[in-house]
Amino acid sequence: MMKNTQPLARVALLAAAFGLATAPFALAADEGSVARGGRLYDKWYKETNQEAPKEAHPLYPKDASYAEKPNANWRCKECHGWDGKGADGAYSSGKHFTGIKGINGMQGGDPAAVVAVLTAPAHGFGDLLSDVDLTDLANFVVHGDYGYDAYVADGKIVGDAENGGQVYRTVCANCHGAEGKLPKEMPPLGSLVGNPYEVMHKVLNGQPHEAMPALRAFDHQIAADVIAYIGAELPAE
Ligand code: HEC
Ligand code: HEC
């Protein structure tokens, strides 16, 4: 008898009827939080409007390339990589090599466990970041889907440049200009596509402490298409 069923129970019944999960109000990841976590992963001190620390991060190896640069070696990405794979990914060699593991082992896990890692003395972020910042970072680590392997082949982003051009001209050109040489002093967008994981990260999550939109809530293929367009059509200098 549906007649006397309470609204909540009705939703559960409907969910059951359609074969959905029995917890009808369980939400998917909050993409806004994940994107902000991505910007914190990039440069947390910019995103939170702080000065970068003046001393090297205690976990950064003393003999690695950026040991003298706290503004670099305090960035999550410097130790764990844009691809989240640490020493198993793009940072397995070269000037960004540290030998540190990735964050990808915690993908799909419990955000509270990530917050516990970040606030432990080794990482030391408990005094530097707010609860909201830590939650956003944890959501990025758990839900960020930063591998992007489906969109990368031979070190380049694979996408439909024609579709990407339509997106570029409507979403990006207002700020970056038709040629990708604006705003401010930034290098031309056409020169940045050589690092597919970094550019995917920026396009999906936005730029720390800037008004740039994050495309994360759309299908990632749209971001890949825009990057394919930038690589194919915009000048590198
Ligand atoms: C200076 C290097 C460095 C920086 C910067 C750094 N980490 Fe780490 N991280 C490590 C090391 C080393 C480990 C492994 C040992 C440990 O847990 O202390 C680790 C472990 C982790 C783990 C656990 C991975 C696992 O599977 O056990 C997560 C998650 C993590 N870091 C996230 C972050 C985030 C998010 C940031 C930025 C807010 C960050 N880290 C900044 C060096 C760093
Ligand atoms: C509201 C303005 C705005 C829009 C719209 C915008 N951006 Fe940005 N973007 C910025 C600003 C500001 C920066 C930082 C510039 C700097 O650091 O000098 C930036 C930085 C970037 C960077 C990183 C540059 C670097 O130096 O690492 C990339 C990549 C990028 N944008 C791509 C895009 C793409 C692709 C789109 C469209 C999907 C887009 N942006 C839309 C404002 C915008």
Image (tube, rainbow, N blue to C red):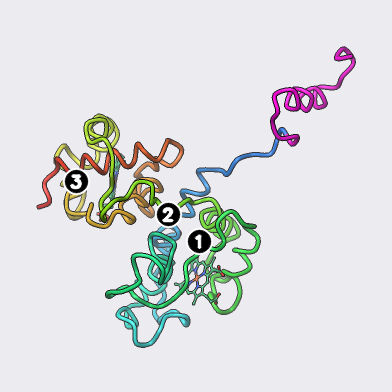
Residue that numbered label 2 is attached to: 147
Residue 79 or residue 53, whichever sits in front: 79
**Label 1 residue near ligand 1, CB within 8 Å:** yes
Q: Is residue 86 above or below residue 65?
A: above
**In terms of secondary structure, where does tag 3 sit?**
helix
- Numbered badge on residue 104: 1
Disc number placed over residue 214 in the picture, else none: none
The part of the image, by quadrant, that contains residue 14 is top right
Of the image marks 3 and 1, the number of the one nearer the N terminus: 1
Side of 132 where 26 appears, left or right:
right
Highlighted range, magenta = 1-23
Whole-percent x, y for residue 16 in the image: 76, 27
Which secondary structure, mark 1? Answer: helix
**Amino acid type shown at disc 1:** Asn
CB within 8 Å, label 3 to label 1? no
Magenta segment: does it hold 22? yes
Residue visible at 55% across and 79% down in the picture: 122
Residue 134 at x, y percent in the picture: 56, 60
Q: Quadrant of the N terminus?
A: top right
Name the residue that disc number 3 marks.
Answer: 231
Neighbour class for label 3 at 10 Å: few (<14), some, many (≥20)? many
